[in-house]
Amino acid sequence: MAFFSFPIPFSGSSAPLDEKAAEKKQIFESARLLQQEVSRFLEQQVDIQDDNENPVRPRLPIFFAKGFNALKAKEVALNYECPLLNLIPYTIQMQLLTEFGPSEDYPKLDKNGFFIETPRPVMEEIEQLEGDLIDYITYHYICTDKMPLLPSSLSSTMKDIGRKSGTDMDEEAVDRMFSLDTVDLLEDDCLIGMLKKCFNIS
């Protein structure tokens, strides 16, 4: 599977006195990481099926739409249009189309450019997050012999799920989870246990 990446130079320097320049640059850099991480995850899902004559279509991780929408909200708040961020829905879709054709499962955009998410129970989203993170770490290690960092959009994804749960997140548990090496999160039930603590679920 082709790894789609479009390095677009950040153009915030046109307004030297722009007080929001740092925030705009942060959105751009976060968008770049999101695009790279999701694209790589899709590619690695195909790579591990190399011996399969009929590979299963790669799935999108939960942190794709949620991470994108979080960045989109920041972009709107700044009255800013990030060129890379607004390409991501199309570059990721094209990556899937190129090898696997169209799919009705690909998330659609609303009139404001946000991904439309189907409402789901909080525990279902937490379980998907656990599965996505385990696969994200495992596939990266299988394909590269290296342990990856956690996805850059994980924090915003967890905050979005936390808002839906209606309870305050345990910030100490969140900090503890992010301080662990990714290899430690693969131990039996470690990740789901940490996520439940973060979301205050017994």
Image: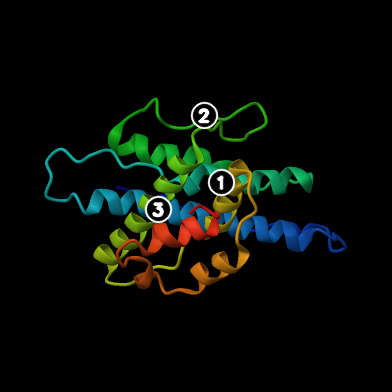
Q: Is residue 110 above or below residue 7?
A: above
Horizontal relation, residue 33 to residue 70: left or right: left
Return the residue at label 3.
Answer: 130
User: For the residue marked with disc 2, what is the amino acid?
Assistant: Lys
Q: Is residue 84 visible?
A: no
Mark positioned earlier in the residue sequence (2 or 3): 2
Q: Amino acid at mark 1?
A: Ile
Q: Residues within 10 Å of mark 1 (few under 14, many from 20)?
A: some
Can you say whether 86 is above or below 12 in the image?
above
Q: Is residue 112 left or right of residue 32?
A: right
Instruction: Please tell me whether residue 146 is drawn above or below residue 104 in the rendered image.
Output: below
Q: Do labels 1 and 3 touch, CB within 8 Å?
A: no
Give the mark nearer the N terminus: 1 vs 3: 3
* Mark 1 or 2: the one toward you: 1
Mark 1 to mark 3 CA distance (whole Å): 12 Å
Residue plotted at (29% across, 59% down)? 139
Quadrant in which residue 72 is drawn = top right
Instruction: Give the residue pinned by disc 2.
Output: 108
- How crowded pointer 2 is (Cα within 10 Å; few <14, some 14-19, many 20+) is rated as some
Instruction: Check disc 1 and report the residue beneath it.
Output: 161
Q: Is residue 145 above or below residue 54?
A: below
**How far across and how far down the image is residue 42, in percent?**
35, 48
Q: Quadrant of residue 144?
A: bottom left
Mark 2–mark 3 Cα distance, whole angstroms, equals 24 Å
- Residue 173 can be seen, yes or no: yes
Q: Nearer the viewer, residue 156 or 40?
A: 156
Relative depth, front residue between 169 and 34: 169
Q: The disc labelled 3 sits on which kind of residue?
A: Glu
Instruction: From the viewer's perspective, tell me whether residue 132 is left or right of residue 30.
Output: left
